[in-house]
Amino acid sequence: MIKRYSRKELTDIWSEENKYKIWLSVEVAAAEAMEKLNQIPKGVASTVKKKARINVKRIHQIEADVKHDVIAFLTSVTEKAGIKARYLHQGMTSSDVLDTSFNIQLIQSGKIILKDIDQILKVLKKQAKKYKFTPCMGRSHGIHAEPVTFGLKLASFYEEFKRNRTRLLNAIDEVSTCAISGAVGTFANINPNVEKHVAKKLGLKVEPISTQVIPRDRHAFYFSILGIIAGSIERVATEIRHLQRTEVYELQEFFSKKQKGSSAMPHKKNPILSENLTGLARMVRSAVMPALENIALWHERDISHSSVERNIGPDANITTDFALVRLTNILDNMIVYPKKMLENLNLTKGLIFSQELMLELTKSGLSREKSYKMVQTYAKKCFAEDLNLFDVVLKDKFIMSRITTKRLKEIFSYNKHFKNVNLIFKRVIK
């Protein structure tokens, strides 16, 4: 991933240096088990651990000749660790190292992304409580519907990211497996106890059955969850973008003192960070389909998944991390305009109370169809002529013979729309 959308915490995980360090830890752990089983001489693991050095440049030099990354890695280790290193990788196949290590990188990434989600939850909780009873317009199809509160909008995002946290925990668990089963996964030349030892040493679970590779449905699940998280990021970003439109302007991304909005128009303050998140979410989701297609490999193994994972592994994780951190900062520093929210609530002059007016007429004995048509007719008239629905209804003798003036005032009130806000918050925010 390009540096512009990367954080060091994640790029370090997906660096060549870290990858080879994990490879080495897998090989050393396997050697320890083989020593205990008297399959290789004592001291191999400790010698390799002490003397081996990761030299990325040298590994690449060797790979240029041998055209095999694991062989190049093992050759490089032997150059530093000496003759005892020849006992590494006994009975193992490349995928034992590659797949186990790839899973560890996913786990390392997933744990940081979990922390990112925790920070988003913290900010959303704080902001939802702050704006718990701040009235704003609820919209369906982009059109004014009925009143909500800005706190409820944020609480909805909070609940969604709680679900994302649970999903990611499950996805991390899904890829927390280890396979040291040799060619085609039959343990023909390696003791299954080696796999048990490596799994325990590296904090993994034994893969119940591998076919020389760890089954890719596990990885497809992980990347699918990243795709869902990206969807949630975009949902919040899209809401912010809509609410910052000039015609709405209920909130705004923080705009620093020296910031410029446009090279041509000095007045512009654009929601560039949220727009950026929309684009980054597309990039993360683009990794999901290739991950799903990786499930169907030929027979016990092919490498059609390899080139895919070398790309989507770092890119999807690094981008998700960056996007979550950016979203946290947006939410924490956004500027909210409650007065504008109230102004927009009153924009249609009472039309947003049409449902309860209709329901009240049905309670008086009118059919739903007649009640609906009557209210809709007045609503259209008010919208076309810029009239207040309350005033128009108040002059209708037929309606007022069925509804008292006091009840009409109650209908055209925001209070009833917020009577269950506390109940909803208790369900969501503990």
Image: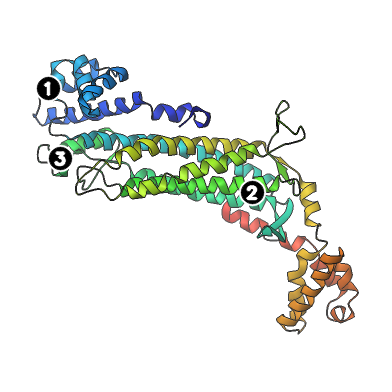
Q: Residue at x 80, y 60 (%)?
A: 348
Disc marking residue 287: none
Q: Residue at x 71, y 81 (%)?
A: 369
Choose mark 3 or mark 1, whichever is in front.
3
The residue that label 2 is drawn on is 239
Q: Using the rendered view, name the quadrant where residue 272 is placed.
A: top right
The kind of residue tagged 2 is Glu
Q: Residue at x 35, y 35 (%)?
A: 310
Disc marking residue 42: 1
Q: Is 114 situated left or right of 40 in this image?
A: right
Asked if residue 124 is positioned above or below residue 374 in the image, the reply reads: above
The kind of residue tagged 3 is Ala
The residue that label 3 is drawn on is 183
Choose mark 1 or mark 2, whichever is in front.
2
Asked if residue 164 is positioned above or below residue 141 in the image, the reply reads: above
What secondary structure is marked by label 2? helix
What secondary structure is marked by label 1? loop
Q: CA distance from mark 1 to mark 2?
A: 62 Å
Q: Residues within 10 Å of mark 2 (few under 14, many from 20)?
A: few
The kind of residue tagged 1 is Lys
Whether residue 170 is visible here, answered yes or no, is no
Asked if residue 54 is positioned above or below residue 360 in the image, the reply reads: above
Q: Using the rendered view, name the quadrant where residue 201 is placed.
A: top left
What percent of the width, then of the height, locates residue 143?
70, 60
Instruction: From the viewer's side, name the closer residue of 306 and 182.
Output: 306
Q: Is 345 situated left or right of 334 in this image?
A: right
Q: Residues within 10 Å of mark 3 (few under 14, many from 20)?
A: many
